[in-house]
């Protein structure tokens, strides 16, 4: 296994940035760096993320097992949390304990929105996409997407 450095300098972050989008949201576009992966962390995720003006993070979703948090560094955005919209700006913190309420972040403003995002990296996760009626079940690197309409309730014995 490749040994990762324990320190990543701010001057190196720009060269490590990548662009991401969510395939189910045509307005999704973010640029950023998975900081935790750069230093070899495996059980926790931390990223610095930039949303350009007029774009959105990923997609309205909730988590069953992995907690998530967001800390706004600069710019402004609109956070949709459990069906309510809230304007957010520098210093604002959002935390989503599990099972979480659905949430999403967008930038309808003229300046770039920059934030830290983090959370758990478990071997398994269940995420719901309530506006799309879909559920994602992940175990390690395998993902299965279900249509919530055709799902059946679990029976416990």
Image: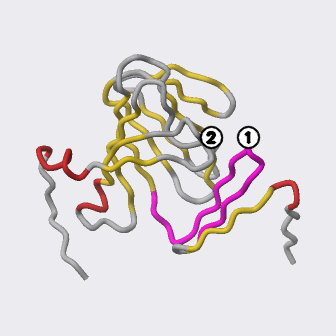
Magenta highlight on residue 137: yes
Mark 2 neighbour density, 10 Å: few (under 14) some (14–19) many (20 or more): many
Mark 1 neighbour density, 10 Å: few (under 14) some (14–19) many (20 or more): few
SS at mark 1 in the image: loop
Judge from the rendering whether residue 17 lies leftward or rightward of residue 85; answer left or right.
Answer: left
**Most foreground residue, 80 or 13:** 13
Q: Which residues are magenta?
A: 120-138
Magenta highlight on residue 96: no
Instruction: Identify the residue shown where x is 56% and y is 48%.
Output: 97
Instruction: Identify the residue shown where x is 15% and y is 65%.
Output: 5
**Most foreground residue, 92 or 52:** 52
Percent x, y of residue 116 = 35, 41
Judge from the rendering whether residue 36 lies leftward or rightward of residue 15; answer left or right.
Answer: right
How far apart marks 2 and 1 lie (CA) works out to 7 Å
Percent x, y of residue 15 = 19, 50
Percent x, y of residue 106 = 51, 30
Snapshot quadrant of residue 34: bottom left
Q: Main secondary structure of the magenta part?
A: strand
Say which residue label 2 marks: 60
The reply to whether dot 2 and dot 1 touch (C-beta < 8 Å) is yes
Which quadrant is home to the C terminus? bottom right
Which quadrant is home to the N terminus? bottom left
Residue furthest front in the image: 26
- Which mark is on residue 131? 1
Task: Answer above or below: position of 23 versus 36.
Answer: above
Instruction: Identify the residue shown where x is 70% and y is 63%.
Output: 145
């Amino acid at each position: 296994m490749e040994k990762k450095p324990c320190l990543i300098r701010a001057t190196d972050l720009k060269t490590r940035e990548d662009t991401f989008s969510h395939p189910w949201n045509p307005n999704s576009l973010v640029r950023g760096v998975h900081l935790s992966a750069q230093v070899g962390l495996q059980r926790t995720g931390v990223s610095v993320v930039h949303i350009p003006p007029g774009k959105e993070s990923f997609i309205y979703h909730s988590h069953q097992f992995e907690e998530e948090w967001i800390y706004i560094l600069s710019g402004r955005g609109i956070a949709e949390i459990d069906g309510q919209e809230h304007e957010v700006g520098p210093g604002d913190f959002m935390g989503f304990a599990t099972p979480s309420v659905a949430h999403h972040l967008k930038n309808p403003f003229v300046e770039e929105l920059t934030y830290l995002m983090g959370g758990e990296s478990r071997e398994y996760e269940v995420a719901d996409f309530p506006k799309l009626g879909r559920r994602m079940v992940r175990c390690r690197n395998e993902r299965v997407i279900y249509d919530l309409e055709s799902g059946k309730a679990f029976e416990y014995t």
